Image (spheres, grey):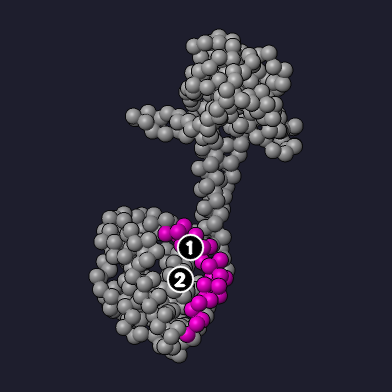
Amino acid sequence: MSAGKVVSLILGSLILIVGIALLFGGGALIGVDQGFTDEEGFLTSPSAELERDTYAVVGEVVLEGDWIWWYRHPTTARIRMTGDVPVFVGIAPRADLEAYLLDVSYSEIEEIDFEEHRRERVWTTEYDDHIGPNAPAPPGDQTFWAASVQGEGTQDLVWEIEPGDWALVVMNADGSRGIDVTGSVGAEAPWLLAVGIGVLAAGVVLVAIGLALVLLVARRSRIAEPHEPAEVQSAAPSGFPLTFEAELTEPLSPALWLVKWFLLIPHFVVLPFLWCGFAVSWVLSLFAILFSGRYPRGLFDYNVGVMRWSWRVAFYSYEALGTDEYPPFTLKAGGYPADLDVRYPERLSSGLALLKWWLLAIPHYIVVGVFQGGAGFEKFGLLFILTLFAAVTLLFTGRYPRDIFRLVVGMNRWTFRVFAYVALMTDVYPPFRLEE
């Protein structure tokens, strides 16, 4: 593939991923607006119970900075509390409230979580209890409240949010001990639906642009397929259609492997973008195989190139340490001690495409997990351990143990065979062996 096609595919994939994220985000905003906005226009949380044997329950409200948003688009909050006895709800500067509750037993809300409990979604609240010997004066007699409300039954405290260090307090109206209320918090967000629709529309546009760029690459390559000479296909090797090359290039520097992680930083920057393109082209190829039985040639060549690039980086770094020659920044084959290729399939099974990448590959996932450090082995897979042994031996003797090299290459070969299979590049089931 030309550099322009590679850039188009990566750029299209990134745009497509961002577009899909915006689709989900816009849909979520619209869902929140429609599902949690009450008849009074407040976006409201589910109710939570506040029950403590203290004089007050305090929650911190910190809005830092004189944000221009608060002045141009003031937001109104509503705190709703319901109790069996007259309840007091107030908002005050935190310093004033702390002075008021000095030497008073009160509970400060540390964390509120929404969890599953007995097949119901409920709030669970964690408190930090402050112990004091005194009882507070009735809260309604205090003058420092920015907003307050008290009375029997349900009480709604409506407050226009301002920047500052505030605290919310819930007490009995007479200042007595023992808090037992049910409350919820809401805020006006009239802009939420419009923002959700805007984000959704932006997602649709970006998805369309991303798809157009990716499909343009696939379409251009597919048109060129009939002009390929027939002998290229007939000359391809038989058996599993992965050609895997790894040449140990000695002499190797005894200590260079100690800094290869640093030298590879440019590759670690580029590879995530390449794999984003791989992921998107895999999804598009899955649908292409389902409906046509063919893997788009442009996407196939790109994905093979990404695998080839990754194998070269792995061979240079800590999955083999087989060469000191720096891996090239190219998807093309040849010119490096490590290489791979996958024979292009003329036809692929639509039914297998739905099963092989998850169900049929499960036995191989277990084996590859042991090799690479998954399947419960964390990062200490066999490849890591063997490469570490080889690195230590290289450091002290200047030689790479040949038996370890053969095992390391075999495990990588097995891994890339499985990867080619689950990437839908072949219907041939990977063999359970390390050798060719």
Q: Is residue 280 above or below residue 158?
A: below
Question: In the rendered image, which quarter is residue 155 located in?
Answer: top right
Circle 1 sits in a helix, a strand or a loop, which is it?
A: helix
- In which quadrant is the C terminus drawn? bottom left
Q: Which mark is residue 369?
A: none
Q: Name the residue tied to disc 2.
A: 310
Q: Badges 2 and 1: C-beta atoms under 8 Å apart?
A: yes
Q: Nearer the viewer, residue 32 or 288?
A: 32
Residue 293: x and y in percent read 34, 60
Residue 224: x and y in percent read 46, 70
Circle 2 sits in a helix, a strand or a loop, which is it?
A: helix
Q: Name the residue tied to disc 1.
A: 275
Badge 1 local density, few (<14 within 10 Å), some, or many (20+)? some
Residue in the image at 47% along x and 85% along y:
254
Highlighted magenta segment, given as a residue range: 254-282
Residue 380: x and y in percent read 37, 66
Gap between marks 2 and 1 measured at Cα: 9 Å
Question: In the rendered image, which quarter is residue 150 located in?
Answer: top right
Q: Amino acid at mark 2?
A: Ser
Q: Amino acid at mark 1?
A: Trp
Mark 2 / mark 1, whichever is N-terminal: 1
Residue 60 falls within the magenta-colored stretch? no
Q: Is residue 230 above or below residue 155?
A: below
| Residue 20 appears anywhere in the view | yes
